[in-house]
Image (cartoon, grey):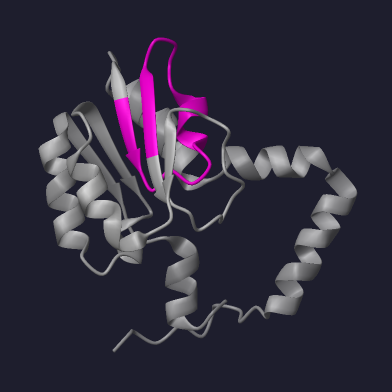
Amino acid sequence: MLPAVPASWEAISAEKIDERWENEIENYGSQFIEKLQTQRSSAMLTHWLVSRYPGCQDIFDVGCDDGIVKTRLPAGCAYRGIDIGADIYSRAPDKGIQYIENAEAIESELRDYQPAQMVFLFDVLEHTASFVNLFEIALDLATERVFVSLPNETNLRVAMGIF
């Protein structure tokens, strides 16, 4: 059972969220979209990680969405990403990103990939039925480090009933 939501948290309805987003887009247009992109947790984590662990040679981003991580990598750091075709964000027209339509095929697809210096699993494991298997595959693919972020804030809010 999930813990109770603290009374101090304000319950926010979907209508209020939609209204707020519409107002932000109307008032700030593309600046709001740009701000939203840079404030995504995977972009912020990548920015911090590559500054903390210099010498980035290549990254493999599992659950890459639109490849936002690539925008935060230093010059010369190769990028590969893979995601299931959920279309949460627009698909990136990038040859370094592979979209898979069959979710059950993700593990076999990953086993065919070449290793990378660092493997990122940002806000992805909680979406899988076999997250231990996916994590073990990431450990096999990484020559140096695996970085994981959990949980995806939106999924956490839904699970706790505050979104």
- Taking the view exactly as shown, the residue that stands out farthest to the right is 27
Q: Is residue 131 left or right of residue 24?
A: left
- Residue 1, horizontal then vertical, whole percent: 28, 89
Name the residue located 20 percent from the left edge and 54 percent from the top edge: 134
| Range shown magenta | 59-81
Name the residue located 43 percent from the left edge and 16 percent from the top edge: 74
Q: Nearer the viewer, residue 97 or 147?
A: 97
Q: Is residue 87 left or right of residue 16?
A: left
- Taking the view exactly as shown, the residue that stands out farthest to the top is 76
Q: Decide: is 59 above or below 154.
A: above
Q: Nearer the viewer, residue 89 or 38?
A: 89
The answer to which image quadrant residue 2 occupies is bottom left
- Residue 14, horizontal then vertical, whole percent: 68, 77
As for residue 64 lying within the magenta part, the answer is yes
Quadrant location, the C terminus: bottom right
The answer to which image quadrant residue 141 occupies is top left
Name the residue located 39 percent from the left edge and 87 percent from the top edge: 4
Q: Is residue 125 left or right of residue 32?
A: left
Picture mark count: 0
Name the residue located 89 percent from the left edge and 49 percent from the top edge: 27
